[in-house]
Amino acid sequence: QKEVEQNSGPLSVPEGAIASLNCTYSDRGSQSFFWYRQYSGKSPELIMSIYSNGDKEDGRFTAQLNKASQYVSLLIRDSQPSDSATYLCAVKGNTGTASKLTFGTGTRLQVTL
Amino acid sequence: EPEVTQTPSHQVTQMGQEVILRCVPISNHLYFYWYRQILGQKVEFLVSFYNNEISEKSEIFDDQFSVERPDGSNFTLKIRSTKLEDSAMYFCASKALETQYFGPGTRLLVL
């Protein structure tokens, strides 16, 4: 069973701080990794994708990938109250182009004023 | 910006009834997916669909479930005889390259 593990939180950070969200995965053959944001009662919304080892930055968001350690992280700089949501780590399977996403349980982030 | 749409947004049904959940994927996408999320749990894969056939399905996707792309734009999920445990949010997703884009979901409640 291929697993994606996340700390469920809640992770509480003050406004303006850096939020650090972590994810580990079990399938060493995985090649594509995604962070989605999900507000309560809403659908997953793509934040970042990352495919190569290292960092990828997009605005206030930085995704980090370490395939040797099977570890993906998401940093949110200058956290805002609107960032309060559940962040889902998703890993694409390696059964082909149509491969499914396997999701973690998500980390709930609370940005406090 | 193009987006995945789903109807209905909410569906209440009696146990044993058939339901059809509808999705309109983004128009140039070729890969289509259904996921579900039981309240408080993680998003779970149900089925993927490409080139008018199922590519992959999960253990959840048993004989009570079926998918169809009836007219080149809609993508449907049918549950033949609903059970209480089918109550969940059902998300349709589509993709062209690597990224799956999710629709707003259908909240299904089975009584």
Image: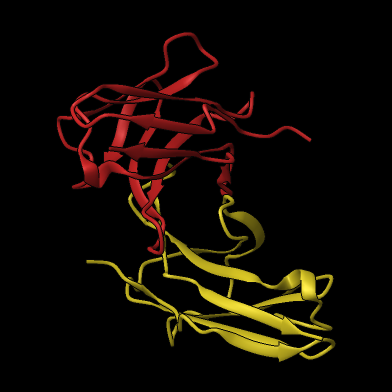
Q: In this view, does B50 lie to the left or right of A79?
A: left
**Residue drawn at 73 percent across, 82 percent down:** A111
Q: In which quarter of the image is residue A4?
A: bottom left
Tell me if residue A70 comes above or below residue B9 in the rendering. Answer: below
Q: The yellow chain is which one?
A: A
Measured as percent of width and height from the top left, residue A94 is found at: 36, 56
Eyeballing the image, is B61 above or below A81? above
Asked if A88 appears above or below A79 in the picture, the reply is: above
Figure quadrant of the C terminus of chain B: top left
Res A21 visible:
yes
Q: In which quarter of the image is residue A70?
A: bottom left
Q: Residue at x 79, y 81 (%)?
A: A79
Residue B90 sits in quarter: top left
Residue placed most toward the observer, A54 or A11: A11
Location of residue B107 in the rendering, given as x and y in whole percent from the top left corner: 46, 40
Position in image of residue B95 (x %, y %): 56, 39
Q: Residue furthest left?
A: B63
- A88 or A62: nearer the viewer: A88
**Chain that the image shows in red:** B
Quarter of the image with the N terminus of chain B is: top right
Q: Can see residue A99?
A: no
